Amino acid sequence: MKVSKFSNKELMLMPYTISQLAKEFNVTTRTIRYYEELRLLKPERSDSGRRLYSKSDVTRLKLIFRGKRFGFTLEQIKEMIHLFDQDRSGRKQLERTVEYGNMKIEEITIFIQELETMRAEMEELRDDFLKKLKESGEKRE
């Protein structure tokens, strides 16, 4: 998933439309509306009802995509984002992020161990098969 490349100057030119954000983040407008339904984004509305996204919404999208890239669920991401709304110091958000991060690191560690075991087993089988091929080739001659 692409992370936004908005410059600080561009961020100051807010608000952005849903189409602009979708293009910038390389997602569909439906994806952005879905995040709004989940209350991850809170766009303002123009007089005509058009969604207008703020710098805060762009930051939230960056956090959503980073969280997804690291394997967090949308529910976990939502909780982490909303914790900042409850505690502007950011302490609660950071504590929960560390907690979820530790859980994810443990999952990754176990997965890596499983992959290393699988690789060792495959290498052993491959070596056995190569040995059998070599032996069968020697017998033919």
Image (cartoon, rainbow, N blue to C red):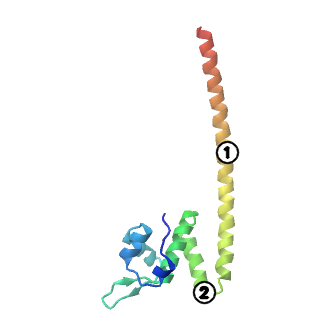
x, y percent for residue 91: 68, 82
Question: Is residue 69 left or right of 46 when viewed as pictured?
Answer: right
x, y percent for residue 98: 68, 71
Q: Amino acid at mark 1?
A: Glu
Q: Decide which of tag 1 and tag 2 comes sooner along the chain.
A: 2
Q: Residue at x 58, y 76 (%)?
A: 79
Mark identifier at residue 116: 1
Give the answer, above or below, for where 105 lies relative to 34.
above
Element at label 2: helix
Image quadrant occupied by the C terminus: top right
Dividing the picture into quadrants, the one containing residue 107 is bottom right
Question: Is residue 96 left or right of 56 when viewed as pictured?
Answer: right
Residue 18 at least partly seen: yes
Q: Amino acid at mark 2?
A: Gln
Characterize the local packing of mark 2: few (<14), some (14-19) or many (20 or more) Cα atoms within 10 angstroms: few
Tell me the CA gap for discs 1 and 2.
Answer: 42 Å
- Where does label 2 land, which residue? 86
Characterize the local packing of mark 1: few (<14), some (14-19) or many (20 or more) Cα atoms within 10 angstroms: few
Element at label 1: helix
Q: Are marks 1 and 2 in contact (CB under 8 Å)?
A: no
Residue 40 at least partly seen: no
Q: Residue furthest bottom?
A: 47
Dividing the picture into quadrants, the one containing residue 93 is bottom right
Of 20 and 50, nearer the camera is 20
Q: Residue at x 69, y 60 (%)?
A: 106
x, y percent for residue 121: 66, 37
Q: Residue furthest left?
A: 48
Dividing the picture into quadrants, the one containing residue 68 is bottom right
Mark identifier at residue 9: none
x, y percent for residue 120: 68, 38
